[in-house]
Amino acid sequence: MGARGSCHCHSVRLLLTALPERVVACDCSLCSRRGMLWAHYADSEVAVEGFTEGYEWGDETISFRHCPKCGCTTHWESRVRTGGSVAVNARLIDGFAEAGGASTSTYSFQGRPAELHFLRGANG
Ligand SMILES: [Zn+2]
């Protein structure tokens, strides 16, 4: 089953081969500021439609993309590998729901629960 998502203004659309089974909360210096929740895919499993702008820092191996109109972070992509990986902002995927609040939050897509993983110390 495919899945899709979009930024707030719908200028950027994400086409995915499947709903994610897990989401990743990363504590790096950027993701912690943005409150990111990522869904990881292989390059071949994601198509991004629409123009995005990038932000790179540190070793600049990853480009964090966002919609220039509404500001939503849409995905990140590797700048050094082909056939590598990509992660999309899980909160933009149609059917995303967060329940519980605060430290008891649980996440689901179209009613199907997703595992939450924490990624600690990914980089600066
Ligand atoms: Zn937008």
Image (cartoon, grey):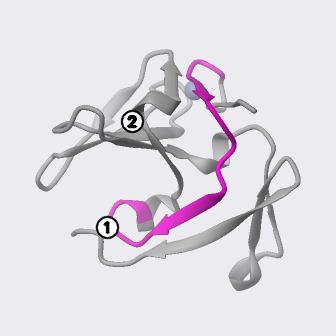
x, y percent for residue 58? 14, 56
Mark 2 surroundings: few (<14), some (14-19) or many (≥20) residues within 10 A: many
What percent of the width, then of the height, locates residue 116? 62, 70
User: Looking at the picture, how far across and down is residue 33, in whole percent?
Assistant: 43, 64
Is 78 colored magenta in this rendering? Answer: no
- Quadrant of ligand 1 in image: top right
**Alpha carbon separation for disc pair 1 and 2:** 16 Å
Q: Residue furthest right?
A: 111
Q: Is residue 51 above or below residue 79?
A: above
The residue sitting at 85% across, 47% down in the picture is 110
> Which residue carries the number 2 mark?
65
Q: Amino acid at mark 1?
A: Ser
Whichever of callouts 1 and 2 sits on the residue coming sooner in the sequence is 1
- Residue depicted at 47% across the width and 58% down the height: 34
Q: Is residue 20 left or right of residue 46?
A: right
List the residue tagged with mark 1: 29
Residue 30 within the segment the image draws in magenta: yes
- Residue type at mark 2 is Arg
Q: Nearer the viewer, residue 114 or 76?
A: 114
The quarter of the displayed image where residue 9 is located: top right
Which quarter of the rendering shows the C terminus? Answer: bottom left
Q: How many marks?
A: 2
Q: Which residues are magenta?
A: 10-31
Say if 55 sits above or below 58 in the image: above
Where 6 sits versus 76, above or below? Answer: above
